[in-house]
Amino acid sequence: MKKNMGFTDRIIRLLVAAVIAILYLTDVISGTLGIVLLVVAGVFLVTSLLKFCPLYLPFGLSTCRKEGKGR
């Protein structure tokens, strides 16, 4: 599994997952919508920790910096 998520992408996903979790735990969102959003937050959390997003593969996307370029 080659990593295809950059630092900024991972941080944004972690922040979104945290916000969703806080909104659910404080009963701002609930019911079916709350459960669906919690699943999305879980997916964001796992993909951020693995540094790999399977949805990027079919499109050839990568938010990683290119290594070895000028820096």
Image (cartoon, grey):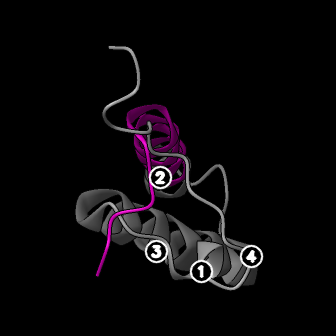
According to the picture, the residue beneath numbered tag 4 turns out to be 59
* Left or right relative to 46: residue 57: right
According to the picture, the residue beneath numbered tag 3 turns out to be 43
Q: Nearer the viewer, mark 1 or mark 3?
A: 1
Chain-order first, disc 4 or disc 2: 2
Residue drawn at x 25%, y 60% as measured from the top left? 49
Q: Please, what is the three-letter code of the amino acid marked with disc 4?
A: Phe
Classed neighbour count for the residue bearing mark 2: other residues with Cα under 10 Å, few (<14), some (14–19), many (≥20)? many
Q: Which residues are magenta?
A: 1-20
Give the camera-side residue of 29 and 51. 51
Query: Judging from the image, what secondary structure is the residue with disc 1 in?
Result: loop
Tell me if residue 32 comes above or below residue 7 in the rendering.
below
**How far apart are the two marked residues, 3 and 2, measured between alpha carbons?**
9 Å
Give the camera-side residue of 1 and 67. 67
Chain-order first, disc 1 or disc 2: 2
Tell me if residue 44 comes above or below residue 57 in the rendering.
above
According to the picture, the residue beneath numbered tag 1 turns out to be 57
* Left or right relative to 57: residue 67: left
Q: Please, what is the three-letter code of the amino acid marked with disc 3?
A: Val
- Residue 16, magenta (yes or no): yes
* Left or right relative to 29: residue 7: left
Chain-order first, disc 1 or disc 3: 3
